Image (spheres, rainbow, N blue to C red):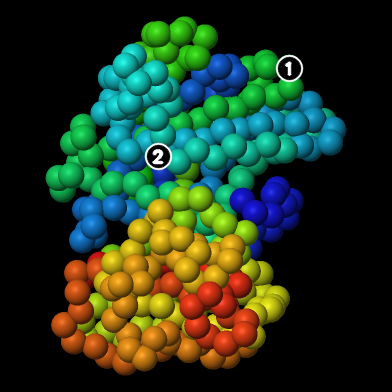
Amino acid sequence: MNTGFELGAPSYRSGPETIFDNTDGVNYYFSTLSPTEEWIDSFAFIADEISGFEQINGFEFHYCSLFQDVTGDSIAAEFRFYEDNPGFMEPTGWTDPIAGTIQNAACTYLLPGLPGDTSGTGLSCWFINVDLMCGFECTLPQEESPGGGNTSYNGFGWMMQDPTGGMDTGPYLGSRIHQTTPGYGTRDLFELMDLTFVGSEWQGTYFFGGDPKAEAIFDLILFGDGIPDTDVINPDVPNTGDVLCLGSDVEFRSGATVTWALDDLGGTAIFPSAAYAMLVGKNGSSAGFGSLAGPGTTLLVDPGSLVTPPTPLVMAGIVPSVTTPSLPGLPPTIWAQAMGFNGGIGAGNAAEASNALRHNN
């Protein structure tokens, strides 16, 4: 999301684990939607996290376009992830006559500059990879009961359009031809919302009726970090110095040894601060605790809950990292955050700050 659209072979930083994939099966068709329509599909996550949530750090979607696009940058897409998609109704809070809210999505991503038909043959199809790592992650609930249920489904909403507003672009459709492992929580139906109909945007539940060749399941792959019970926490309002990306190799819980390391954001390994160190505490907040660490930074670890005397933990190496000892008796949550310091490691001297990592025990 920071680098914009890049044409070429995908080079992933998101992942490395695939946490949802409904692309199994042979693709036969795609379908187009008008620029005022949103199609909301279903998926689910298995209930296997202490927190009850799953975190997406990247996704891949597939679409085709009939729109002649010489420059290869004329299509706009907007995608939304919803905390629920009960089916046969709109997601909770999509329209709210009291609060006046619409499209109450957990996360929304606007992607301009995508290609239409660049082949000159009348049709081009594309696989697009979106990297959400380091500031754009999306956290969604896992299923409430094993095996799923109406309240256990999440939703993924599609809106795509070309400059003319024509119905020329839309997603690949799934099928059961040679399918062996469908995406968890997929259903052969989708909700159709239309912004044209103010006050009655939900137009109903639709399917294509073509099983097994054309299902109302749209190609989507979701990626996550694969580290159980560990969440990336970004500041609600990022500051100018909130530019570091912190990750870990395993979950940090009683008896575990974890390595926290900064990502070099593309292999450049350029870290301008004089020194790097970690703050580790029992509590934290995405709202932050002001700029106590330094101007332009957001402190996400509660300074009154620090558990690592001497504090902070110094990070070393060309790509700064630190490895903890094996610790017994950890609290229910551990919050970790990295800072880059100038003028000595200490309060008020941080010039760079990372996201926080919340480890659940």
Q: Assess disc 1: are there few (<14), some (14-19) or many (≥20) residues with their C-alpha within 10 Å of its C-alpha.
A: few
Quadrant position of residue 287: bottom left
Compared across the picture, whether 212 is left or right of 331 comes to right
Q: Which sits in the foreground, 124 or 116?
A: 116
Which residue in the structure is indicated by mark 2? 106
Pointer 1 residue: 164
Label 2, residues with CA under 10 Å away: few <14, some 14-19, many ≥20: some
Question: Residue at image x 79%, y 37%?
Answer: 72
The image position of residue 85, as x and y in percent, is: 31, 31
Q: Is residue 48 above or below residue 172?
A: below
Judging from the image, what secondary structure is the residue with disc 2 in? Answer: loop
Q: Can residue 86 be seen from the camera position used here?
A: yes
Residue 152 percent coordinates (x, y): 23, 39
Toward the viewer: 149 or 62?
Answer: 149
Disc 1 to disc 2, C-alpha distance? 29 Å
Q: Quadrant of the C terminus?
A: bottom left
Q: Are marks 1 and 2 in contact (CB under 8 Å)?
A: no
Name which residue type carries label 2. Answer: Ala
Asked if 358 appears above or below 41 in the picture, the reply is: below
Along the horizontal axis of the image, is 347 left or right of 34?
Answer: left
Confirm whether residue 247 shows in the render: no
User: What residue sits 24% from the left and 88% below the top?
Assistant: 327
Residue closest to the eye, 101 or 85: 101
Residue at (67% x, 16% y) in the render: 166
